[in-house]
Each structure stands twice: as C-alpha cells, then as structure tokens.
Image (cartoon, rainbow, N blue to C red):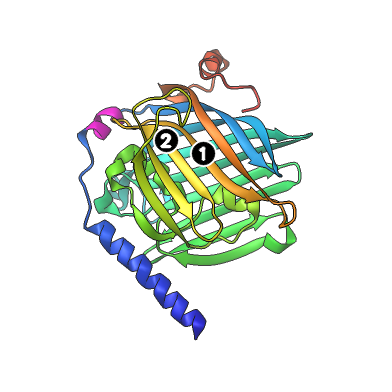
C-alpha cells in the first residue's frame, strides 16, 4: 500500500511538472537557427578537475554540439529523410567526453544526448547514453523515450549490475539540460520536481537510475564563480535525497555557450566519506565539420583545442 501511494504521488508530481512545461512551449529562437544552420559542429575543450575515489584528478573534457536528423521510430540519426518524412525530426545532439587518470589506471567517459530542437516535437530527450571505461571494466547505460516512460538498459562487468532492464517515470533526464541551454534557456524547468540524475555520476557512485526530487534554479552567476568569464547564467540542480549539486555555467546571450560546470557530492563509505567538487572550465572552442576531418592533415585542429593525444 505504501509503495502504491508513493508511486501515485510520484506520477502526479511528474504529470504536474509535465503539464506546467507544456504551457510554456516557446518557438525555436531565430538566433538558434542562424548559429546552427550549417553542417558544422561546435567543439569545445575544458580543463577538468574530476573527483573519483575520494580524490581530485586532472584531466580534459570535450563538449560537441551539432544538429542532426533523427528517426523517432528507430531512435537513430538518419540520412534517409525522404523515405520517412513524418518520422524525421531535427534534434540537437550533445556528446560529452572526459579523460583522466586515477593512479596507474586511466578513465574515460562519454555521454550522448539527443533532444528535439522544436519543443512542439516533444519536451523530453529522445535518447540518452552513458559509458565508463576503466581498467577495472566497462559500464554502459541507455535511456530510450517511450510515450509515458523511459526504458533503461544497464550493462556492466560487475555481477550485481551486469544485465538490468527497467523503467523510470517520464520526467526530465538531467543530461538533457545541457541541450536545453543551447536551444533556449528560457525552457529550463525551475522549482522542485522529479529528475533522473546524470548517468555518469550515477555510475561513478553505483546508484540506482531512478527519478529523484531536486530543486532547479536559474540565476545570474557571479563573475568570480568560474574562471574569468563575465555575463554568465548559472543553472543549478540540487538533489534533496543525496545532497548532490550540479551547476552549469553558460553565456547569457545566444548561442549560450557552456563556460564550464561544477558538480559536488560525497564519495566513499560512511566512515570515510568526503564531499568533493568536480570543476570544468572552458579552454578553447571551434566550429568544424569534424566528421570530414579524419585525415592526419587536420591534427592541427586538436592542437588549437589544446587536446592531448589520449583524448
């Protein structure tokens, strides 16, 4: 009975949040179309201080944003637009990768998010994937949007997590907010609501992928909060259950470039638990058709981003 009451409450909360969002559907800003109307992607590098195993590790992060054509039925990007016109929508795709070392071991992560550009095509990310590669093994997570829920797949080397298939309430995945910022930050939800936490931090802490209550705020950032950037906004996601906080800093004017982020949570066992903060700060950014530049002749582009050979 208690489970049933909690489920109904969560469902109602999610539905209320969803209804509130539907009332605020805004057209795609002209500035977005002007910036993303070509085939180029925006590639940005970040200096990274990543928390892991109770310590802070130096590394690099890369954010890639690009618009793509996406098939609703296949939930894959596609070039066959003429065959299924009613099935194809424009999406903004984000790819976020992080590379850092923990002692002798190396760690790399990747998150991919696919979000409709026009909210009339849907409020929620269509697909989110996350993977962690470490010497100890690999983990892969995938969220696929269904009409009224998210299907979750988890694959891992760990026996307790090796094969899991489950569902989550239909609500915003935290990883979607990176795309929402770039499309139109006025669409960012604010207030208290259920959110599906970021996939990478969930894997780092081996926590269950489920909707959790969080407080969402959009404020003007102080100039000294992140590097030497000015005229920034800050979007904060503060979870009430585990006190994890994600802060995304971005330019207050279009194209709302990501300047960096901070993520704070406790790591370790109860007796040795400590609260640490991951910090990423924008280093360099370019626009490029990177898919056509796989030749060694274009290595100089990596140099312009300050990327190491390991990233």
Camera-side residue of 227 and 64:
227
Labels 2 & 1 near each other (Cβ < 8 A): yes
Let me know if residue 188 appears in the view: yes
Magenta segment main secondary structure: helix
| Quadrant housing the C terminus | top right
Which residue appears at 40% of the width and 46% of the height? 177
Q: Which mark is residue 249?
A: 2
Find numbered disc 2 in the image and state the secondary structure of the residue it sits on. Answer: strand
The answer to whether residue 97 is left or right of residue 78 is right
Up the image or down, 301 lies above or below 180; here it is above
Residue found at the very far right of the displayed protein: 104
Q: Quadrant of residue 180?
A: top left
Which residue appears at 41% of the width and 55% of the height? 215
State the image coordinates of residue 145 (x, y, percent, origin top left). Answer: 42, 59
**Label 1 Cα crowd, 10 Å radius (few <14 / some 14-19 / many 20+):** many
The answer to whether residue 253 is left or right of residue 141 is left
Sequence-wise, which precedes: disc 2 or disc 1? 2
**Label 2 Cα crowd, 10 Å radius (few <14 / some 14-19 / many 20+):** many
Find numbered disc 1 in the image and state the secondary structure of the residue it sits on. Answer: strand
Which residue appears at 22% of the width and 38% of the height? 29
In the rendered structure, which segment of residues is drawn in magenta? Answer: 31-37
Magenta-span inclusion, residue 21: no
The answer to whether residue 133 is left or right of residue 277 is right
The residue at which mark 1 appears reads as 262
State the image coordinates of residue 119 (x, y, percent, origin top left). Answer: 27, 50
Which residue appears at 45% of the width and 75% of the height? 7
State the image coordinates of residue 12 (x, y, percent, origin top left). Answer: 35, 72
CA–CA distance in space, label 2 to label 1 = 8 Å
């Amino acid at each position: 009975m208690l489970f049933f009451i909690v489920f109904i409450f969560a469902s109602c909360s999610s539905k209320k949040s969803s209804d509130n969002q539907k009332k605020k559907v805004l057209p795609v800003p002209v500035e977005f179309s002007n910036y993303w109307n070509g085939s180029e992607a925006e590639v940005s590098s970040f200096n990274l201080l990543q928390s892991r195993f109770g310590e802070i590790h130096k590394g690099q992060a890369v954010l890639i944003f690009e618009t793509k054509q996406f098939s609703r039925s296949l939930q894959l990007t596609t070039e066959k637009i003429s065959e299924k016109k009613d099935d194809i929508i424009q999406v903004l795709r984000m790819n976020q990768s992080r590379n850092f070392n923990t002692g002798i071991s190396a760690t790399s992560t990747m998150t991919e998010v696919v979000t409709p550009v026009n909210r009339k095509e849907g409020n929620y990310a269509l697909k989110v994937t996350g993977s962690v590669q470490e010497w100890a093994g690999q983990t892969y997570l995938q969220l696929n949007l269904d009409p009224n829920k998210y299907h979750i797949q988890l694959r891992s080397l760990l026996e307790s997590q090796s094969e899991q298939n489950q569902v989550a309430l239909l609500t915003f995945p935290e990883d979607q907010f990176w795309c929402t910022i770039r499309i139109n930050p006025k669409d960012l939800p604010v207030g208290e609501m259920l959110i599906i936490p970021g996939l990478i931090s969930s894997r780092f802490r081996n926590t269950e992928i489920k909707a959790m209550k969080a407080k969402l705020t959009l404020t003007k950032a102080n100039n000294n909060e992140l590097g030497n950037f000015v005229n920034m906004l800050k979007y904060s996601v503060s979870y009430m259950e585990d006190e994890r906080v994600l802060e995304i800093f971005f330019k207050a004017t279009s194209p709302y470039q990501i300047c960096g982020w901070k993520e704070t949570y406790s790591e370790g066992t109860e007796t040795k638990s400590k609260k640490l903060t991951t910090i990423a700060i924008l280093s360099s950014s370019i626009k490029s058709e990177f898919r056509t530049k796989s030749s060694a002749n274009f290595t100089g582009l990596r140099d312009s981003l300050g990327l190491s050979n390991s990233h």
